Image (cartoon, grey):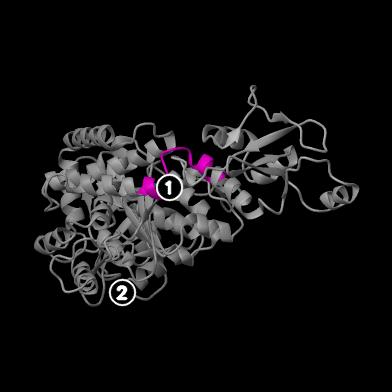
Amino acid sequence: MHPNGDVKRVELCSWIRVAGLARDCNSQGWEILVQLRDPDGLVHEELIPYSELAGDGTTAYARLKSRGLRSMGGKGVKNAILSCLEMWETPVRIRMVPTAGHHDGRFVTPSKVYGPTDGDELRLDRRNLRPGQMTEYKGTKELADELASLCVGNSRLVLALSTAFVGPLLHLLGIEGGGLHFQGESSIGKTTLVKIAKTPYGYSLQTWRGTDNGLEGVAANHSDLLLVLDEIGESDGRVAGRVVYMLANGTGKLRADARGEARTPKTWRLVFLSTGEKTLAEMMAEAGQTIKAGQEIRMIEIAADAGAGMGIFEDIHGFPSPAAFADHLVALSDKVAGVAGDEYLTKLMADVDSAVATVKTHMDSFMATYCPAGAVGQVSRVYRRMALIAAAGELATSIGVLPWSKGEATAAAAYCASNWVDRRGGVGSSEAMRCIESVLSQIERYGSSRFDEWTQAPLSTDEMIVDKAHIRYGWRRMQNGRWEYYATADGWAQLHEGFSKDLANKALIDAGILKPGNDRTPKPVTVPGYKKQRLYHIVPPSEDDADA
């Protein structure tokens, strides 16, 4: 304003406006959503925290300038621009959400929000996204259908692609996350499999390489979606088991902020697919760790080789070779991304209640039809997960996202679940089965060296000295054409090392291998040359036994 009262308009900067005010889900972290035009005429958006306007505002102003803002020189221009932005009145309110997925009845992805349009605008805070974590859209419905059609008749491909549609259902059903690990030799098509599985949402392949800390941010940005991790062999065996728990349970580490106060940990819900030549158990064993049943059911290991002599394939749809078929699938997967996922989320969020009812019906039917009788809780939980995968594939089929026939996803999930049971060795407790395997393995390895042969005459003094000089678990004797073993308490402890005594006793008694006394304790036995003592009577199964 001139001293004489005239008002003169002065252009301080290039075109800029406030498009709205943003804050987090707790109405904290307020920010100004600024739009500005760069010298090329392109419009950019920048979130400026109110906290950056405190003091001289240099940080906020520098970020605007880096986006292409041009301004007049002179003292006070920066402060005038920032003051204008801070006091700008706008009715638009934006809620920034920290993870992808379900929020306030809508589904948020890095590129789009699905569901009702009423209420505050929702946006995923994209500042934590890494390259490859943005949803990519390319290709057509026809290409996506062609790719899915070629999966038909291939149980591993159908299972993997069906898994891609599970993530958005987790929150709606109140089910925790989990994953599948396709394990097998190199060059059988494992990477082809996960490349197909990732196409519905367009995210890039991630790797196991790195730390569990680094994967927290990746997981949060795949919440309610699918995370694909290629080659478990690139990970540290000391970390891999912990990562499986972390991904499935959906919570990162608790950390302190700059003031020493606890920060809210990252959270997510997701389904993940993994590949590798090694099993998780092998990775952990190399690091001196033992796999737990909880890890086995949170990351279900599926043999990548379908058993048809063609790696992951069972039907190559007329192609001259599995390699040619794989090349065609990879080429298609490179041309299509985000198409099926966009259609699926649009239709899912348009009628959530119907979708949930359909999925629950499919899951109940799958469990009633395929879950083996007598399955322990661990096996039932795995079958429940496979039922969810089957139901997701059937839902995507029924709403026109997948061009499959009814029952295709169910058949693949049931077949792979049956393969899993066969590979596992039965429907009993995994800890019990590992314990039995460990005890029998030790007996096979040390049966003749650490179990003295039962004699009918007392040992001589020299024999007693030799007897005391070597590691001894107990005695063995030939009964009815097979060796039976009698372990001392110390010997039995060595045999079931790594497993609790109670678990070992119950597992081997239930399997008919450990023959207890009347009170389910070690039997009172007299070994020639020794006083009566309580020994563990072990009868390994022979090849003729039905349960061998």
Q: Nearer the viewer, mark 2 or mark 1?
A: 1
Can residue 473 be seen here? The reply is yes
Image quadrant occupied by the N terminus: bottom left
- The correct choice, above or below, for 414 with respect to 319 in the image is above
Region of the chain picked out in magenta, as a range: 420-435
In the picture, the disc for residue 424 is 1
Q: Tell me, yes or no, whether the highlighted magenta stretch contains residue 428.
A: yes
Residue at the farthest left position: 142
Q: Nearer the viewer, residue 9 or 492?
A: 492
Mark 1 and mark 2 in contact (Cβ < 8 Å)? no
Horizontal arrangement in the rendering, residue 468 relative to residue 331 (left or right): right
Q: Nearer the viewer, residue 542 or 441?
A: 542
Q: Which residue is mark 2?
A: 70
Q: Percent from the top left, x then y, of residue 313?
A: 25, 62
Earlier-in-chain disc, 2 versus 1: 2
Which three-letter amino acid code belongs to the residue tagged 2?
Arg
Q: Which quadrant of the view contains residue 323?
A: bottom left
Q: Would you say the magenta stretch is mainly helix, strand or loop?
A: helix
Q: Tell me, yes or no, whether the highlighted magenta stretch contains residue 377.
A: no
Which three-letter amino acid code belongs to the residue tagged 1?
Arg
In the picture, the disc for residue 473 is none
Horizontal arrangement in the rendering, residue 487 relative to residue 327 (left or right): right
> What crowding class fits label 2: few (fewer than 14 Cα within 10 Å), some (14-19), or many (20 or more)?
some
Q: Secondary structure at mark 1?
A: helix
Q: Percent from the top left, x then y, of residue 520?
A: 63, 26
- The correct choice, above or below, for 400 with respect to 196 in the image is above
> What crowding class fits label 1: few (fewer than 14 Cα within 10 Å), some (14-19), or many (20 or more)?
some
Residue at the (29%, 51%) spot, across then down: 123
Residue at the farthest right position: 461
Residue at the (30%, 70%) spot, across then down: 12
Horizontal arrangement in the rendering, residue 354 relative to residue 294 (left or right): left
